[in-house]
Image (cartoon, rainbow, N blue to C red):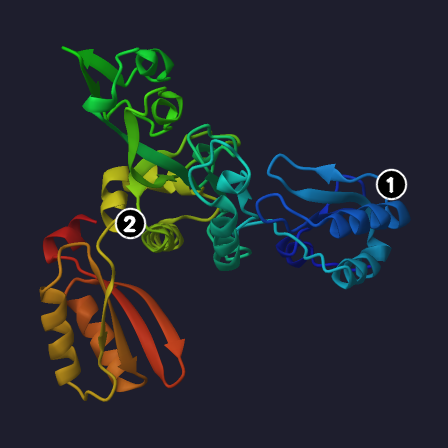
Amino acid sequence: MNVNLEELKRVGIIAQRQKDYFLFRLRTVAGELTAEQLSAAAAISREYADGKVHLSTRQGVEIHNIHVSRLREVSDRLEKEGITLGACGPRGRGIVACPGRATCAFGLVDTKELAGELDREYFRKDAPHKFKIGVSGCPNNCSKPIENDIGVMGGVLPGWQKDQCIHCRLCLHICPTEALENREDHYILDLEKCILCGLCIVNCPANAWEPRQRGYTLFLGGTMGKKPRLASRAKILIESKEELLRFIKAAFDFYVHHGRKKERFGHTLDRVGLERALEQILAKETQTLDLRGVSCPMNFVRAKLAIEDIDEGQRIEFFLDEGEPLVNVTRSLKNEGHRVLHVAPEERYFRVLVEKRTHKFARAV
């Protein structure tokens, strides 16, 4: 039986070392399947495999030892039971997440909802290499976000209330990173040491420590494997989910543009330069300029004026009519030394994403 191994890997059907046998990786979001889906997976394993279900290190569920002659039967059966196949190869993988605020006493953010949104956006999305995302509700780090290409961790910034404090000094003893210090009966927080875990808030008997700000801390570039690299902390306490999702999209786009084949995101960051990469990823929100219906050369003139108003490394997206407007404006912006990052066709027009570059910087790059 002839099979395309790469196409099978794309949907989570992976060849085993045993000839003509495959494993099925099932799609899970934050490690969840319904009880009915678990029962169905067990029944399928009993009927088509060896009666076992494997739980992977990334909250995945796999059925091993399925013969090549039964791939179609098993695929159809899983679909009938409402179970989606997973992913393998150079693309977005399943999202790992802890329970977060849904059930965990330490959870600071809603991990389940966020994991679902990230899954819808990045699951099976093509990338230079495997692309993994981990979400943790707090700095307990249970879902290991710092070992993922994108890591998200809930956090809370504590603030001290002098009038409430009874000077029991419990906070000094309970802080895991010794980020608190007592100076003349004032308690000082060292932001460089603080991991935003909130233990001082939760355990203070007098409620002298209170939450000042909640949000998400974003980590980039973690990976294990043959060349381990812990993720770099890119930005702390991002207050809105919308802003967080924008930064994650910018990070993924950066990886797609700069990453080499079979190069993990963290190694791309190291090769390009972490500081330079973060400047681009954390840049202000991309502006847009609609130039549809504007004829040449006025469309280029307006594009040039718009790009002069943004900062070095910032991006702007132009909407251009197909044909001469698309060709001429894109070519002219390249000739000016700017970087055209992406050209995406829409219905009867194109979106062109451009990154501002000076001639001096373009030559250096």
Is 337 drawn above or below residue 232 in the view shown? below
Q: Quadrant of residue 65?
A: top right
Q: Residues within 10 Å of mark 1 (few under 14, many from 20)?
A: some
Seen at 37% across and 55% down, the residue is: 249
* Callout 2 amino acid: Ile
Image coords of residue 224 (percent x, y):
50, 31
Seen at 26% across and 12% down, the residue is: 167
- In depth, the one of 177 and 349 nearer the eye is 177
Alpha carbon separation for disc pair 2 and 1: 47 Å
Is 250 drawn above or below residue 145 in the view shown? below
Direction from residue 54 to residue 234 in the image, left or right: left
Residue pointed to by mark 1: 50
Q: Secondary structure at mark 1?
A: loop
Q: Secondary structure at mark 2?
A: helix
Image coords of residue 218 (percent x, y):
36, 41
Seen at 20% across and 12% down, the residue is: 182
Direction from residue 107 to residue 62 in the image, left or right: right
Q: Residues within 10 Å of mark 2 (few under 14, many from 20)?
A: many
Is 290 drawn above or below residue 313 in the view shown? below
Is 35 drawn above or below residue 108 in the view shown? below
* Label disc, if present, on residue 158 of the rendered structure: none
Q: Are marks 2 and 1 in contact (CB under 8 Å)?
A: no
Tally of numbered discs: 2
Image coords of residue 115 (percent x, y):
50, 49
* Label whose residue precedes the other's in the sequence (2 or 1): 1
